[in-house]
Amino acid sequence: MKQTLRAIRGMNDVVPPQTAHWQWLEKTIGTVLAGYGYREIRLPLVELTQVFSRSIGEVTDIVQKEMYTFTDRNGDSLTLRPEGTASCVRAVLEHGLLHQQAQRLWYRGAMFRHERPQKGRYRQFHQVGVEAFGYPGPDIDAEIILMTARLWRELGLGNLRLEINTLGTSEERRGYRDALTVYFAQHRERLDAESAARLERNPLRILDSKNPDMKTLNAGAPVLADHLGEESRAHFAGLRALLDAAGIAYEVNPHLVRGLDYYAKTVFEWITDELGAQGTVCAGGRYDGLVELMGGEPTPAIGFALGMERLLELIAANAAGETTEADCYVLSAGPELLGPAQAVAEQLRDALPGVRVICHCGGGSLKSQMKKADRAGAAVALILGPDEHVAGEITVKALRGETAQQRVPLAELAAAVRGLLGR
Ligand code: ATP
Ligand code: MG
């Protein structure tokens, strides 16, 4: 048996007709984001490793064990991007996009993390990310959450719940960290191996554990709210008031921490119970210190990322998008009519932009061509025989519905097809 090559585990092809669902999702998201004044930025897939190690934090899962890092032929350490925020900050600084101005930006594309592949968790996955720079107040936090809520409505997702929390400032977190260290040290025997390792380096991350056995212990842990200063409290109260005013339901989850070091103040996640442990479809928060950390002027910032695979799994049932191959299928009776048939197809594409026309290739009887037309999902078959060709006409046959087949002059073809397609 011939041996064929396979894709790397956790890195998936997207093949038709699923690509149509992706395109529909991407288009819907792009339209919603544009509706709030966000503009697209395109970023490279590969960056200097430092872009991530500096920003994400040395003691995070991503930097410690998930990055695809390699040395290129110049001896530089490069990394396939595991997320987009760090690249985005690098890019806005490099292009001076933050001089005297705020920015609302978004990007999309593949991210790479060496995780254990399972449903909803892949090694190449796709995100749409949004970042807003230069807005210090809770107004933008609320706007971003409102925007995601609108997106769920557009996608027909009624069952996502919103969890929010505040992580305060890094100083406030230091006091909290000490309290957590004391608490978890008291219960050292109940920590799993991963959490025990986190205890010394970053006890906050224990709260982020995916291990169900850690739930009870985490539930009894001290909460950050008791360590917050006046400004952080006011910011969070401001966000809550705006969400209340907009009628957005949320739950304050005091143990919601994000996996990355750079977050501060507001963090949020949209979660579904329908995808098991991989239930977070959208996660984000404020990262006021990151721009400065990466060499820029102090700049408040907030962002989020959507997991496209998880969203698609969730909307599988009602995902829209055109999954057929064609609207019209042009058939020809015999090799001498191939050229004229292709000319008819071109004429139709000129007249009806957006209508998908397949001109049959590969020969065969009209009967076998008709089967192909049907399999392509076409609504209309256009049959060019010798008689039609001589008369400057073509036979138009509706493949769905009851309309009788008819011969029409080529000059009237576009109108006839438009009528049958209903557009
Ligand atoms: P998780 O806690 O599930 O590991 P995370 O906190 O690492 O997620 P983020 O870095 O915040 O995730 O990424 C934002 C979103 O991207 C996640 O909420 C999820 O929807 C998606 N995502 C993250 N990692 C993966 C992955 N390996 N495969 C598929 N989607 C992912
Ligand atoms: Mg993760």
Image (cartoon, rainbow, N blue to C red):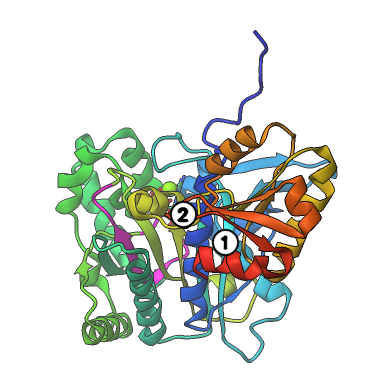
User: Can residue 294 be seen in this snapshot?
Assistant: no
Residue 18 lies, with reference to residue 31, above or below; the image says above
Q: How crowded is mark 1: few (under 14 residues within 10 Å), some or many (20 or more)?
A: many
Task: State the residue lying farthest toward the bottom.
Answer: 100
- The residue that appears at 33% across and 72% down in the rendered structure is 149
Circle 2 — which element?
helix
The numbered disc on residue 62 is none
The numbered disc on residue 308 is 2
Which residue is nearer to you in this view: 152 or 384?
A: 384
Determine if the C-beta at disc 2 is less than 8 A from ligand 1.
yes
Residue 25 lies, with reference to residue 317, above or below; the image says below
- The residue that appears at 66% across and 14% down in the rendered structure is 3
Which amino acid lies under the numbered mark 2 shown in the image of this protein?
Met
C-alpha distance separating marks 2 and 1:
9 Å
The numbered disc on residue 108 is 1
User: Can residue 248 be seen in this snapshot?
Assistant: yes
Q: Do the residues under discs 2 and 1 have CB atoms within 8 angstroms?
A: yes
Residue 327 lies, with reference to residue 124, above or below; the image says below
Query: In terms of sequence position, does the residue under pointer 2 or pointer 1 come before the other?
Result: 1
Which residue is nearer to you in this view: 150 or 221?
A: 150
Circle 1 — which element?
strand
Which residue is nearer to you in this view: 224 or 214?
A: 214
Q: In which quarter of the image is the N terminus?
A: top right
Q: Where is residue 234 in the image (x, y as percent from the top left)?
A: 28, 86
Q: Where is residue 349 in the image (x, y as percent from the top left)?
A: 71, 63
Q: Where is residue 344 in the image (x, y as percent from the top left)?
A: 75, 58
Q: Where is residue 355 in the image (x, y as percent from the top left)?
A: 62, 62
Examine the image and state in which quarter residue 225 appears. Answer: bottom left
Residue 6 lies, with reference to residue 13, above or below; the image says above
Boundaries of the magenta span: 258-274
Determine if the C-beta at disc 1 is less than 8 A from ligand 1.
no
Q: Residues within 10 Å of mark 2 (few under 14, many from 20)?
A: many
